[in-house]
Every structure is written in structure tokens, then in C-alpha cells.
Image (cartoon, rainbow, N blue to C red):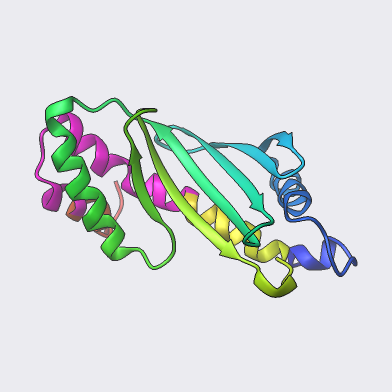
């Protein structure tokens, strides 16, 4: 059964209320920050992530930032930025950015709902899932560049390589 089938009949729902309902259905940790913002705790294989979604009524955009703390050695920052560019070249939806002042890697995405468009639960779920999947997929590459002093191109190859067989 699709989210929308088990979900709601309302033609219009505040985007953050929609996020909250989707998060409840997925059993994600939820903290309602205010009327237009919500924070989610997502547990991954590599680490825990914090996703924040905010509704921006001025430009009718639902914005997502899925973050994880990183503290790479300062001399490795140019390689981290190179890796971010390489990763973002491969992503069609969203992208990574390094927030140096917070020492946080963030995957950002904006869902434009201009003209009174309404997001559906499947869209919101896919948006959050895409952020989580990207963070999980590329986290090892960020670690390899930061701490193993791997070349960004080599670290990216490891992150995008398909695994074959079984261990």
C-alpha cells in the first residue's frame, strides 16, 4: 500500500505536517522545531544523521539538509572539496556542501512547490530517503580522504563500485 493510500484525504496539508506524518510511519526520531521546521534522527550503517526540513513560504520550497559531523584535518580540506565536486557531478538530485564553521557535511535538497503545488507523502519519503542514501553511500569516501589520505578519485571509485558476490 502506498503512503498516500494509508495517509490522508486532505487536498492540502502543511508540508512540515506531512513530513511529520511520514516520519511517524517510518518510525524515525522526530523533533518539531517550530511550525515551519522539523528535525529527524536517522540511524545508518556508518553513523547517525540529522535531517532538518524547513518550509520556506516566501519561495514555496521545502528544504532539506541531512548532516553529519566531520572533523577532517585542515590540510585535507582541499581534497575534501575536490571530492564534494566529484560526488556532486554524479548526483542528479541534491548535493553535498561542507559547512566549515560547524564542521558539518551536509546533503541539501529543495523541493519547489511554487504556484500552490502540494507535496505528496511519496515525494517527501523519496526526498528524505535520497538524502540518507547519499550520506550512507559517500560517507566512507569522506573518511578515506580525511583520515586514510586517499586521493579523492580513488575514494570515490570505492564508494560507487558495485559489490559482487558474498562474504
Whether residue 28 appears in this view of the structure is: no
Q: Is residue 44 left or right of residue 20?
A: left
Q: Residue at x 78, y 66 (%)?
A: 4
Q: Is residue 133 on the magenta stretch?
A: yes
Please provide percent x and percent y for residue 161: 24, 58
Q: What is the magenta range?
A: 132-156
Q: Is residue 52 left or right of residue 4?
A: left
Q: Is residue 101 left or right of residue 80?
A: right
Q: Is residue 89 on the magenta stretch?
A: no
Please provide percent x and percent y for residue 113: 65, 68
Please provide percent x and percent y for residue 167: 29, 46
Point out the residue furthest to the right here: 9
Q: Residue at x 26, y 50 (%)?
A: 84
Q: Residue at x 42, y 48 (%)?
A: 107
Please provide percent x and percent y for residue 9: 90, 67
Rendered view: 144 above or below 123: above
Report the number of discs: 0
Whether residue 29 appears in this view of the structure is: yes
Amino acid at each position: 500500500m502506498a503512503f498516500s493510500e494509508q495517509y490522508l484525504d486532505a487536498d492540502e496539508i502543511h508540508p512540515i505536517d506531512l513530513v511529520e506524518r511520514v516520519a511517524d510511519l517510518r518510525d524515525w526520531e522526530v523533533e518539531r522545531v517550530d511550525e515551519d521546521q522539523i528535525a529527524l534522527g536517522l540511524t545508518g550503517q556508518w553513523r547517525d544523521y540529522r535531517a532538518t526540513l524547513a518550509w520556506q513560504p516566501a519561495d514555496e520550497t521545502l528544504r532539506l539538509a541531512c548532516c553529519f559531523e566531520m572533523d577532517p584535518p585542515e590540510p585535507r580540506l582541499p581534497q575534501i572539496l575536490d571530492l564534494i565536486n566529484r560526488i556532486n557531478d554524479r548526483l542528479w538530485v541534491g548535493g553535498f556542501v561542507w559547512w566549515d564553521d560547524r564542521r558539518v557535511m551536509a546533503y541539501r535538497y529543495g523541493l519547489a512547490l511554487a504556484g500552490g503545488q502540494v507535496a505528496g507523502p511519496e515525494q517527501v519519503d523519496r526526498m528524505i530517503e535520497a538524502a540518507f542514501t547519499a550520506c550512507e553511500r559517500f560517507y566512507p569516501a569522506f573518511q578515506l580522504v580525511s583520515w586514510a589520505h586517499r586521493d579523492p578519485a580513488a575514494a570515490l571509485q570505492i564508494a560507487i563500485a558495485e559489490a559482487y558476490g558474498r562474504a
